[in-house]
């Protein structure tokens, strides 16, 4: 059984991705960030210390903020078309930029990912699901917890009150417990996530980042990986660790790379686990 591992498109279909059409695989697993940030990231870094006082929209102005949203939203369709064109079943999770119109976040999207995905016969969006197939089990969890929710950032955002953080983290923990409890055997199991687990492929090396030098992985992911030991963990988000692997006990972590740079990987789970990276 072979899988295409791909994600972190950021709205760009690199010409190198055409190599995928000549490869042999049964399923594709997309670990999120289908759209571009529309230029959002540079403003978040620039105004990081002001975001606890007022939202970014008010800092940079509504006109500039809306242009960011429009640029980001326009990139979604091309990414979905590419994934659908693979002609194989594609399981997709959300990254930190793949938001819905009503998301309570600093960059709500102008289009609905869940609605757009339904227009393509080969695509399936998984928010928190366990998929059981004859030859493998897929455990998928969409989304991303922000540094404040992880206790890494002490800014007092209005929505990040202590009760709100506790409630968000409790819900996150419960949904992971639910999807892992549905798995009967972890032989040939794959855990598909966007953010890496804490202390593994997660240290920020970008000096421009307000979080430089910190480990920003998800502690709840680490908790459940340690407990259940899924055979493969597919993650992304941290571009410093593109096409890197790590181990947590018997679990193998794989970051397939940045699709916007033409990177991806092929995973084989037949008699033995094999990973081939394409740069």
Image (spheres, rainbow, N blue to C red):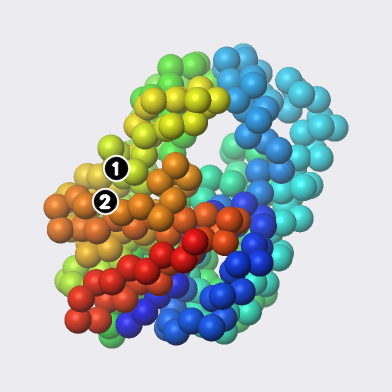
Q: Is residue 234 left or right of residue 58?
A: left
Query: Which residue occupies the foreground of this view, 155 or 262?
Result: 262
Rendered residue at 53%/45% (across/down): 96
Q: Residue at x 31, y 76 (%)?
A: 268
Tags 1 and 2 touching, CB below 8 Å: yes
Q: Earlier in the sequence, mark 1 or mark 2?
A: 1
Looking at the picture, does residue 18 appear above or below residue 30? below
Residue at the disc numbered 2: 246
The residue carrying pointer 1 sits among few (fewer than 14), some (14 to 19) or many (20 or more) residues within 10 Å by Cα, namely some
Residue found at x 37% / y 69%? 276
Considering depth in this image, is 213 or 220 the residue closer to the camera? 213
The quadrant holding residue 266 is bottom left
- From this view, report whether residue 135 is shown above or below residue 91: below
Task: Label 1: state its secondary structure.
Answer: loop
- Tell me the CA gap for discs 1 and 2: 7 Å
Q: Position of residue 24 (x, y in %)?
A: 44, 84
| Of the pair 189 and 237, the residue shown nearer to us | 237
Residue 179 lies, in percent from the top left, at 30, 60
Kind of element beneath mark 2? strand
Q: Is residue 6 visible?
A: yes
Pointer 1 residue: 200
Residue furthest to the right in view is: 63
């Amino acid at each position: 059984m072979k899988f295409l591992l791909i994600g972190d498109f950021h709205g760009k279909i690199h010409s190198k991705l055409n190599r995928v059409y000549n490869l042999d695989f049964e399923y594709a697993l997309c670990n999120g960030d289908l759209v571009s940030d529309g230029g959002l990231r540079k403003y978040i870094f620039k105004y990081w210390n002001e975001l606890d006082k007022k939202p970014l929209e008010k800092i940079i102005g509504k006109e500039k903020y809306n242009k960011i949203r429009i640029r980001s939203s326009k990139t979604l369709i091309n990414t979905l078309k590419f994934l659908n064109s693979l002609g194989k079943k594609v399981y997709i999770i959300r990254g930190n930029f793949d938001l819905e119109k009503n998301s309570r976040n600093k960059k709500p999207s102008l289009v609905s990912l869940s609605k757009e995905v339904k227009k393509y016969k080969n695509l399936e969006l998984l928010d928190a699901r366990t998929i059981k197939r004859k030859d493998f089990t897929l455990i998928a969890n969409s989304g991303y917890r922000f540094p404040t929710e992880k206790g890494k950032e002490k800014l007092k955002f209005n929505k990040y009150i202590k009760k709100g953080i506790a409630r968000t983290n409790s819900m996150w923990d419960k949904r992971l417990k639910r999807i892992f409890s549905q798995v009967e055997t972890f032989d040939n199991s794959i855990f598909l996530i966007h953010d890496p687990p804490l202390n593994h492929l997660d240290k920020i090396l970008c000096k421009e980042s307000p979080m430089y030098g910190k480990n920003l992985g998800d502690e709840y992911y680490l908790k459940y990986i340690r407990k259940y030991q899924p055979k493969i963990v597919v993650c992304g988000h941290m571009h410093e660790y593109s096409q890197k692997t790590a181990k947590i006990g018997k679990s193998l972590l794989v970051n397939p790379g940045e699709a916007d740079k033409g990177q991806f990987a092929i995973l084989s789970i037949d008699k033995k686990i094999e990973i081939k990276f394409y740069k």
